[in-house]
Amino acid sequence: MALSIVIGLMSFASLPDEVIKPQDNGSKYGKDSATCVMNISLYREFYKQWKQSGYKNSSLNDALKSWRWVFNNCPRSTENIYVDGVKMIDYKIKKAKNPSVKEKLIDSLMLVYDQRIQYFPLHYITKKPQEGTILGRKGVDYYLFDPAKNYLEAYNILGRSIELDKEDASGPVYIYYFRSITKMAQKGDIDTAAVVDAYDMISDYVDANIFKYEKAGKAKDAEEYNNIKGNIENTFEPFANCNDLVRIYQIKYNSNSENIELLKKITKLLDKKNCIDSPLYFKATVSLYKLDPSPESAYLIGKMMLKDQKYNEAVAYLEQACKMENEEWAYKALIFLAEDYQSLNKFEKARATALKAAKMNPLAGKPYIIIGDMYAASAKDCGNDELTEKVAYWAAVDKYKKASSVEPDLAESMANRISSYQKYFPSTELLFFHNINDGDKYEVGCWINESTTVRPAK
């Protein structure tokens, strides 16, 4: 793909859309600072008129004439050259009828992105490198103009963007990078295993964003990344069945069973795609823990034992897993450990662990569901008469309401749970017999030891 456009003998006025590689003398306003400032003012004025018209009137052509002079002669003058240039050239590309003209315009657009990276490598506010972000926009645009033709180059551009920005890349970068690599696999340019590896990397970054935004209470952003995740999952579907994943990684495991990074990749991906019943998952998990007894590998062993109902054996592994630095995975480990204690009827330990999970992820309802379920299961054992055998259900419902309040998506399932337990509340007659009124405060004893509100059965 050419990044410089040969103007030839055509006049500047007749081809305001084309650009050449800027002539840079190192100064902000170039060799002719007065003309540079004048052209910046002219192009910006015409650009504003075009923008105010809803990007419809002919001011665009006048803007491009002055913009092109600025781009070619004083490329360091203002970052607006590149921000506005992308908007104007993108518009011209979409309106172009002649394939040759369109191709030149696309090359020009790519050059605009490259020159922005060269002359404005740092974000004007944060002062942090922005090469990854700009490459992401460049790669997405390049892919979308002609996916069938541009997927290979887009893959390289977007891959570099992700390499630089990792989980801070934008959603479309992940989507179109993954689409480009799946096209490569379909065309025979790469092996299917590369698609699996790319999915492994990208899904981790997307999941990290979902967790980050959910924890921060940014529901709109979390929903956006959930949609991105769905898009990637759909693209991956033809490559995602357990048989193919096991086939791909069994070969790698057989030839390199002591490669820790490979074992991490195998266990993580098979776990993510729920292929944990395969012998490969078991072997890779055990091998990983032997070679690298870290909190991460302990998590996998503990989860596997929990699934096999080996509750006592799972405890030590899950306790170690809770020390993971990754908060998303540490939260999951705490939830599994709480469920493990719950299965062992160690309710106080389970509650303490669930509350740690709730502190780590304040917008998750699962910890309160675990506690509510234990309260409900303890009701009869915590009472010694008809009244006290029912009061724990009040505390259980309190937890279900808390789960629904912190995670609104649970509202329907929690309403069903609450409805099913309200019928076990003490009757109005029983409350009257014990001289207790609806709305009174009540201390639930036993291991629960919590204050709740009196409510009659419904």
Image (cartoon, helix red, strand yellow):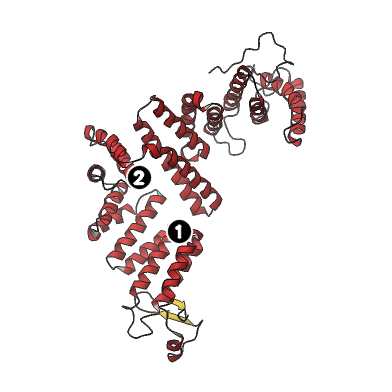
Position of 106 relative to 350 (above/below): above
Which residue is at a point 62% across and 35% down the rendered structure image?
Answer: 124
Circle 2 packing at 10 Å, graded few (<14), some (14-19), many (20+), is few
Question: What residue do we see at 45% from left, 34% from top?
Answer: 178
Q: Secondary structure at mark 2?
A: loop
In the picture provided, is 357 more to the left or to the right than 310?
right
Along the horizontal axis of the image, is 49 left or right of 176? right
Compare residues 326 and 309 and report the one nearer the observer: 309
Kind of residue indicated by mark 1: Ala
Figure quadrant of residue 267: top left
> Regarding mark 1 in the picture, which secondary structure is present there?
loop
Residue 364: give its label. 1
Residue 53 picture location, percent across and down = 76, 35
Which residue sits at x=40%, y=75%?
A: 393
The answer to whether residue 280 shows anywhere in this view is yes
Instruction: Classify 293 as above or below 356.
Output: above
Residue 237 lies in what quarter of the image?
A: top left
Disc 1 packing (10 Å; few <14; some 14–19; many ≥20) = many
- Sooner in the amino-acid sequence: mark 2 or mark 1: 2
Residue 150 appears left or right of 423: right
Task: Choose mark 2 or mark 1, whichever is in front.
Answer: 2
Which mark, by number, is residue 44? Answer: none
Which amino acid type is shown beneath numbered disc 2? Lys
Question: Is residue 170 at least partly visible in the picture?
Answer: no
Q: Position of residue 363 (x, y in %)?
A: 48, 58
Name the residue tied to disc 2.
273
Counting from the top left corner in percent of width and height, residue 108 is at 61, 21
Give the image location of residue 202, x and y in percent: 43, 39
